Amino acid sequence: MRQSRRTGIDASEQTEMIRHGLFRHSRNPIFLGILLSFVGFFLMIPNALTLMLGGISHVSIQTQLRLEETYLHQTHGDAYEAYTQVVPPWL
C-alpha cells in the first residue's frame, strides 16, 4: 500500500487505487484479517466476551466499509465500479 496507507477517510487526500497484492483477491483484505483474528480468538477462548467482541468488531467493520465504499465510488468513479465487478468484498 505504501503511500496509500491511511486510517479512516480523509476527503482532502488524493490516493491511487491499489489493485495488486492481496487487493487482487479481496477489496478488504485488512478487515478480513481482523475478522479472522477475532474468529481465531473466539475459537481459542470460546466465551460470551470474545463472542461479543467479535460481534462488535463485525458491526464496526461493516459500518466502516459502507463509508469507504461510498468514498471510493465518489473519488474513483467508473474505475472503482469496474474493480468492484471483478474483485469481491471478502473472498
Image: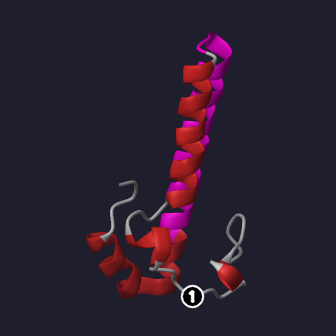
Q: Quick check: can you spot residue 63? A: no
67, 80: nearer the viewer: 80
**Extreme-front residue of the structure:** 44
State which quarter of the image contains the N terminus.
Answer: bottom right
In this rendering, is residue 57 above or below 49? below
* Kind of residue sitting beneath label 1: Glu
In this rendering, is residue 25 above or below 82? above
Q: Residues within 10 Å of mark 1 (few under 14, many from 20)?
A: few
Residue 12 position, x and y percent, is: 72, 84
The residue drawn where x is 62% and y is 11% is 47
State which quarter of the image contains the C terminus.
Answer: bottom left
Residue 20 position, x and y percent, is: 46, 79
Quarter holding residue 48: top right
Residue 6 position, x and y percent, is: 71, 71
| Numbered range of the magenta stretch | 46-70
In this rendering, is residue 74 above or below 31? below
* Magenta stretch: includes residue 64: yes
Q: Quick check: can you spot residue 32? A: yes
The residue drawn where x is 51% and y is 50% is 32
The secondary structure type at the circle numbered 1 is: loop
Q: Which residue is disc 1 drawn over?
A: 16
